[in-house]
Image (spheres, rainbow, N blue to C red):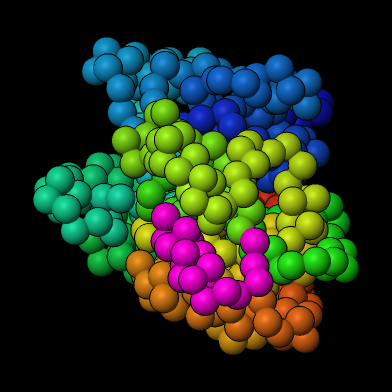
Amino acid sequence: MPARQKTLIYVVTEDWYFWLHRLAIGQAALAAGYRVFVCARVQAHREILEQLGFTVVALPWRRGGGPLLNEIKTLWMLWRLFRRERPDIVHSIALKAIIYGGLMARLAGVRARVSTVAGLGYVFTSQRLKARVLRRPVLLALALGMRGPDALVTLENPDDGDRLAAGGAMRQSQVALVCSCGVDTDRFAPKPEPDGVPIVAMACRLVRDKGPAVAVAAMRRLKAEGVPIRFLLAGGTDKGSADSHTKEEVESWVAEGLVEWVGHISDVVSFWQGCHMAVYPSRYGEGVPKTLLEAASCGRPVVTTDMPGCREALVDGETGFLVPVDDDAAVAARLKQLALDPELRRRMGQAARAKALAEFADARVQAGMLDTYRRVLAL
């Protein structure tokens, strides 16, 4: 009698997030013989995910919170799904999904659970009163979702694990993998720099905590100094986030001559290949930002902040530069250094590509995650 096909259920907040950040791991699970579900708020990727072999379950939640009835309905839907499908593994990705998916999996009797911490975000890095008040309840909720004898945790950087362990949300002995976000190094391949004025590029959702305004302030300094440099900004405003820049704000940067805004792009590879360097002055705790890995894989040096997640993506002074948070003068100084020194860009770009191949290639991350699934099933 053939062995029963194992079932793996991913819980993520948004279908686009799974598509952009976890697709390679999900495809590796399909190739390994798992029956794979993706539970998320569905916006635009259901059809393509189903064509690839995933079963998509639409949830009525929003990543930043929504109507209470929708949140309750989401919990009920997850519990019913877990009871009906009896998954071998539930893999919850990012904090809200860990709380909801992990807790409902425990209540439904799912034995093997994997939690992926993809950065600690606002609640753990902001010093605003609301964030400080929420921190302890969130830690307690995460403990319910993450802990247990049959549960493992994967991290994108070790700082997050230290902080969650100190807060009682997990045990360090649960950590199965550090670096659970990869990049397709075959697709994101280096090309020679384009001719002309050096271009610094940034690609992200245009929310304040990712630092686009800090990059703009740095460009204002460089423009005043007469440094030959262009700033190409890709990404859209996020109506679902109270932290988002407005379209009017971004257009004012364009009118000031500081930014060339290309909006949402589908060809990210060509975007990075068409620039000389990358900037990403993030202001909060992330996992390992995928945008940094893509730029590095294309052989582009990066200027980013010395924050958890960002610092894991590069070696300061070798593959790029780390700068203090909210320090547009330091960002400007490092961008100027790169803009005026083609040999430095070439050397750092080669080192960035080598680091991406050695540490962040999709194949390496896929192998680590499949091993994590084998380990959690053996607990």
Asked whether residue 295 is in view, the answer is yes
Q: Residue at x 38, y 60 (%)?
A: 283
Eyeballing the image, is 187 above or below 15? below
Eyeballing the image, is 199 above or below 95? below
Does the magenta segment cover residue 228?
yes
Q: Residue at x 78, y 21 (%)?
A: 51
Q: Which residues are magenta?
A: 213-230
Eyeballing the image, is 99 above or below 161? above
Q: How many marks?
A: 0
- Image side of residue 226 versus residue 50, left or right: left
Question: Between 234 and 199, which is closer to the camera in this rendering?
Answer: 199
Q: Residue at x 41, y 70 (%)?
A: 328
Q: Position of residue 150 (x, y in %)?
A: 44, 48
Question: Between 145 and 242, which is closer to the camera in this rendering?
Answer: 242
Q: Main secondary structure of the magenta part?
A: helix
Does the magenta segment cover residue 65?
no
Question: Between 39 and 301, which is closer to the camera in this rendering?
Answer: 301
- Image side of residue 63 versus residue 193, left or right: left
